[in-house]
């Protein structure tokens, strides 16, 4: 697990080594064990290394036999030993035992088509001196990040945004479409970033750049499709889910450094821990953090799972209200990102990093197996579509009037009111109504700029999707938006900030392809979510964990903004230079802060998002 960056000067001037090293040093935390660079005429590539496999060698950049190809690589290829054996039979000579060197020889054989052979998570760059090309690629699900920018005669790429903006020729202008999406979703969806001219390479995409010209070619090499359904019995499907999940976990246990599992006591992480504990010779290390607020503390469930699987368990009570952690994370994300679960994820990574370098997690199972409660809510909402739209709106307003406004958006009343508003919407607007953190009207009252709406963005994406079942359409949307733009950046940044490599077995593409091919009722039936996953592992995990209520990995932000962070939030928002420079309405913001403080409304999502934005602006724009 590492970090990469690079520069192309299209004016044919030689790359400055000092500048390349400066960019590389901004991502030191991603790879504190080693660094390296290679400069060739108008091109420079660089690498930071966190040593996981073949600790004695594997210094990057790595080259092929005749030094015509050079690679920098971030990630892990889980089938690299099999690929390596095949390449040796074809006459390739290896100097290391790393997966990185396998990729460079595979690229020599197949060019960009080598990506279809790789099983793993990755972001990589290959310099081809024969063709005067630079090849950039990202893994299928988007587990490893890759940013790029082209301005005049300068092309820059890197694993994190702060390395890109370190280059003095890359302009830092705010992308207000990205800012509007951020206020709605708390993240900025790809390919956009907070900067106008800096972009994210999409998952399962690669880019070919002619190093002697400004010619760039973007291509997609894999799609997460739902249309190719198969005919298979439920029992046979269960057996195959079990088999593929076991394989996915086993592949991700390869490591030459200490390894463990992030264990919440939920179904997903318990399955990973249970399978991993059976595969290892020594007791598996598991890690959990907890909070003083019992609504957010899962330590008892994690402890039960750890005892059941006989793991070497570590748990710690932490205080995520420490605001210095927030300020530190803003530096690592490089753009506004306001999913508050980044705080416990960071603290868990920091705690586990004291004992391990590689961790497995249960991330991705909710998107792949239909685990989110919102899928069920949406499914049931469709049953009432026979009621005319105008009548639905009237009924929703009537019922909403009976249930008073709550100062806690995350309470039962808050969720019920959100469901009512969703039910009143047209079918294709309901999902955004459920997941949006700030409404379009509120956004325009605080920031009166007319940009493309987030709803429009979702509709454009969905027009290209393959799912026919209405809930699978939402799953496909999440796999293309929420997963690669929120969940995966969160765990990548939180883990890499603590020099930990995090692996997610449920994001194995072979497992995903199989699950997508199954009938929808294998995933949700009646009110049972993740049906086939739970049934496939009913003998592995304790019944108490199967039947427990899902908690999520959240923190009480609404309460903190009325107490510990109250004055801090007002100072940042009402006196912030970023808030003023971008044209936010101070009058509207004062009103929102007062309503939240007085508990007449819950504006925690908007206030928290604006605080993060202001911290980011102070760090990167001033």
Image: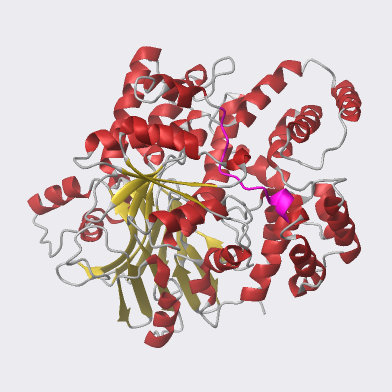
Which SS does the magenta portion mostly show? loop
Residue positioned 49% across, 64% down in the render: 147
Residue 360 higher or lower than 519, as above or below: below
Please provide percent x and percent y for residue 27: 43, 71
In front of the other: 166 or 214: 166
Q: Quadrant of residue 409?
A: top right
Q: Is residue 493 visible?
A: yes
Snapshot quadrant of residue 213: bottom left
- Residue in the image at 38% along x and 26% along y: 541
Q: Nearer the viewer, residue 190 or 420?
A: 420
> What residue is shown at x 48% (from left), y 29% (from top)?
369
Could you tell me residue 412's position as x and y percent?
73, 31
Which segment is the magenta one?
A: 549-560
Asked if residue 34 is positioned above or below residue 441 in the image, the reply reads below
Q: Is residue 400 left or right of residue 566?
A: right
Classify the position of the N terminus by image quarter: bottom left
Quadrant in the picture for the C terminus:
bottom right
């Amino acid at each position: 697990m590492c970090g990469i960056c690079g520069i192309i000067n299209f004016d044919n001037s030689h790359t400055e080594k000092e500048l390349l090293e400066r960019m590389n040093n901004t991502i030191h935390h991603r790879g504190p064990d080693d660094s390296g660079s290679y400069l060739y005429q108008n091109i420079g590539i660089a690498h930071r290394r966190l040593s996981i496999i073949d600790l004695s060698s594997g210094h990057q950049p790595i080259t092929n036999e005749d030094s015509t190809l050079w690679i920098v690589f971030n990630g892990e290829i889980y089938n690299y030993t099999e690929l390596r054996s095949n390449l040796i039979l074809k006459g390739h000579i290896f100097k290391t035992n790393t997966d990185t060197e396998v990729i460079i020889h595979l690229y020599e054989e197949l060019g960009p088509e080598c990506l279809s052979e790789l099983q793993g998570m990755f972001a990589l760059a290959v310099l081809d001196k024969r063709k005067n090309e630079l090849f950039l690629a990202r893994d299928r699900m988007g587990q490893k990040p890759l940013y790029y920018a082209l301005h005049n005669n300068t092309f820059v790429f890197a694993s994190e945004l702060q390395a890109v903006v370190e280059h003095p020729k890359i302009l830092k202008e705010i992308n207000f479409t990205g800012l509007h999406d951020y206020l709605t979703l708390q993240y900025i969806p790809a390919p956009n970033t907070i900067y106008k001219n800096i972009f994210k390479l999409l998952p399962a995409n690669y880019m070919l750049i002619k190093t002697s010209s400004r010619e760039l070619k973007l291509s997609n090499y894999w799609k997460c499709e739902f249309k190719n359904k198969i005919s298979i019995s439920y029992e046979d499907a269960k057996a195959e889910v079990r088999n593929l999940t076991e394989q996915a976990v086993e592949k991700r246990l390869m490591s030459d450094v200490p390894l463990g599992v992030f264990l919440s006591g939920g179904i997903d992480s318990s399955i990973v821990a249970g399978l991993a504990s059976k595969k290892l010779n020594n007791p598996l290390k598991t890690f959990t953090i907890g909070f003083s607020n019992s609504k957010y503390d899962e330590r008892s469930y994690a402890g039960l799972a750890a005892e059941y699987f006989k793991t070497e368990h570590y748990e710690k009570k932490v205080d995520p209200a420490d605001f210095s952690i927030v300020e530190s994370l803003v530096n690592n994300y490089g753009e506004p990102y306001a999913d508050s679960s980044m705080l416990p994820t960071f603290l868990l990574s920091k705690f586990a990093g004291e004992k391990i370098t590689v961790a497995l997690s249960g991330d991705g199972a909710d998107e792949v197996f239909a685990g989110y409660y919102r899928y069920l809510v949406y499914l049931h909402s469709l049953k009432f579509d026979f009621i005319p739209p105008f009548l639905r709106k009237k009924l929703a307003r009537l019922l909403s009037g009976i249930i008073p406004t709550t100062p806690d958006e995350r309470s039962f009343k808050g969720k019920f009111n959100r469901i009512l508003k969703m039910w009143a919407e047209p079918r294709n607007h309901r999902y955004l109504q459920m997941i949006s953190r700030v409404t379009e009207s509120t956004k325009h009252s605080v920031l009166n700029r007319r940009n493309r709406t987030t709803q429009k963005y979702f509709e454009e994406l969905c027009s290209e999707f393959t799912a026919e079942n209405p809930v699978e359409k939402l799953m496909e949307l999440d796999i293309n938006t929420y997963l690669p733009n929120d969940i995966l950046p969160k765990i990548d940044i939180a883990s890499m900030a603590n020099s930990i490599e995090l692996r997610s077995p449920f994001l194995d593409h072979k497992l995903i392809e199989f699950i997508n091919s199954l009938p929808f009722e294998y995933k949700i039936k009646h009110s049972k979510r993740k049906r086939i996953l739970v049934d496939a592992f009913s003998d592995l995990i304790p019944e108490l964990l199967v039947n427990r209520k899902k908690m999520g990995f959240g923190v009480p932000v609404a309460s903190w903004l009325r107490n510990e962070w109250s004055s801090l939030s007002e100072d940042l928002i009402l006196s912030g230079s970023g808030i003023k420079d971008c044209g936010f309405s101070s009058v509207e913001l004062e009103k929102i802060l007062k309503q939240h403080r007085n508990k007449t409304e819950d504006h925690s999502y908007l206030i928290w998002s604006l605080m993060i934005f202001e911290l980011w602006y102070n760090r990167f724009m001033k």
